[in-house]
């Protein structure tokens, strides 16, 4: 099993996290995903900061 990234707010994985999800940078609420640093980001900020998704399949 891949290493799971936990939400920094509730220490749960994205699948069970019930936190209100918004981008930690711009507060957008559109298409928010947990990233490898445990914070939620919108697609734009993810790309801008080059932060990988928490549950992306890598190699
Ligand atoms: Zn959470
Ligand atoms: Zn954003």
Image: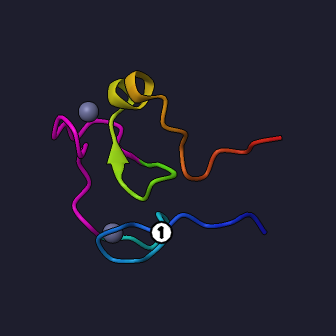
Q: Is residue 25 left or right of residue 48?
A: left
Quarter holding residue 23: top left
Secondary structure of the residue carrying tag 1 is loop
User: On the rendered image, what quadrant is the C terminus found in?
Assistant: top right
Dividing the picture into quadrants, the one containing residue 8 is bottom left
Residue 27 is situated, as x and y percent measured from the top left of the image, at: 16, 41
Within the displayed image, which quadrant is ligand 2 positioned in?
A: top left
Does 10 sit above or below residue 4? below
Viewer-nearest residue: 56 or 51: 51
Residue furthest to the right = 59
Measuring 34% from the left and 41% from the top, which residue is drawn there? 41
Q: Is residue 49 above or below residue 58?
A: above
Q: State whether residue 41 is above or below residue 38.
A: above
Q: Which residues are magenta?
A: 19-33
Q: Residue furthest left?
A: 27
Q: Please provide percent x and percent y for residue 49.
A: 40, 29
Q: Nearer the viewer, residue 21 or 54?
A: 54
Q: Position of residue 32 (x, y in %)?
A: 35, 43
- Label 1 crowding class (10 Å Cα cut-off): few <14, some 14-19, many 20+? many
Q: Which residue is mark 1?
A: 6
Q: Position of residue 7 (x, y in %)?
A: 39, 66
Q: Is residue 39 left or right of residue 15?
A: left
Q: Is residue 39 left or right of residue 24?
A: right
Dominant secondary structure of the magenta stretch?
loop
Count the labels in the image: 1
Magenta stretch holds residue 23 = yes
Q: Quadrant of the N terminus?
A: bottom right
Q: Residue at x 26, y 54 (%)?
A: 21
Eyeballing the image, is 14 above or below 29?
A: below
Q: Residue at x 48, y 29 (%)?
A: 50
């Amino acid at each position: 099993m891949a290493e799971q990234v936990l939400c920094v707010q509730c220490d749960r994985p994205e699948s069970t996290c019930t936190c209100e999800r918004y981008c930690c940078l711009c507060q957008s609420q559109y298409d928010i995903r947990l990233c490898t640093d445990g914070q939620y980001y919108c697609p734009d900020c993810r790309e801008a900061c080059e932060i990988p998704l928490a549950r992306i399949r890598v190699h």
